[in-house]
Image (spheres, grey):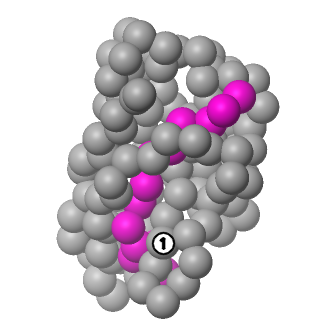
Amino acid sequence: QVQLVESGGGLVQAGGSLRLSCVASGRTFSTYAMGWFRQAPGKEREFVAAVNWSGGSTGYADSVKGRFTISRDNAKNTVYLQMNSLKPEDTAIYYCARSSSSLRISFLEYEYDEWGQGTQVTVSS
């Protein structure tokens, strides 16, 4: 069973930047697509970004496109989410997740079978 551990969350002012990291245990990290989701208070969890096994294909929610960048370093078993031009509406708990697929970029929560514990991101206005 893989373990996913997120870090890098915190409090930032609107317009600022944060970089989230998610380190995965196990030797099969490079064979799976990975994704980031978030859940704001009182709202359902939503898709943010995903990357395929090689890092060559990415996908984003419209709300973060052009501001967030997902990437991965398979040598370090780590996936990143660079968040720029942060807005108060980006405030949420951010979760890293492992897809059940290696190639397909999915925004569907049920296609992810392993989840981290989440890291809080708070953007003040």
Residue at 71% x, 28% y: name it: 101
* Residue tagged 1: 39
- Residue at image location 46% in from the left, 79% down from the top: 40
Asked which quadrant contains residue 77, the reply is: top left
Whether 113 is drawn above or below 60: the answer is above
Whether 50 is drawn above or below 118: the answer is above
Q: What stretch is highlighted in magenta?
A: 89-101
108 to the left or right of 124: right
Say which quadrant the C terminus sits in.
Answer: bottom left
Along the line of sight, the residue nearer the viewer: 17 or 107: 107
Q: Position of residue 42 (x, y in %)?
A: 48, 89
Quadrant housing residue 79:
top left
Classify 89 as above or below 98: below
- Counting other residues with Cα less than 10 Å from the Cα at mark 1, is it few (<14), some (14-19), or many (20 or more)? some
94 magenta-colored: yes
> In this rendering, would 30 be left or right of 59?
left
Residue 96 percent coordinates (x, y):
45, 46
Name the residue located 58 percent from the left edge and 78 percent from the top edge: 44
Q: Is residue 17 above or below residue 25?
A: below
Q: Relative to 18, is 68 on the left or the right?
A: right
Residue 35: percent from left, percent from top: 56, 43
Which amino acid does the dot numbered 1 rest on?
Gln
Q: Is residue 102 magenta?
A: no
Query: Which quarter of the rendering shows the N terminus?
Result: top left
Q: Nearer the viewer, residue 5 or 10?
A: 5
Along the viewing direction, whichever of 116 and 73 lies nearer the viewer = 116
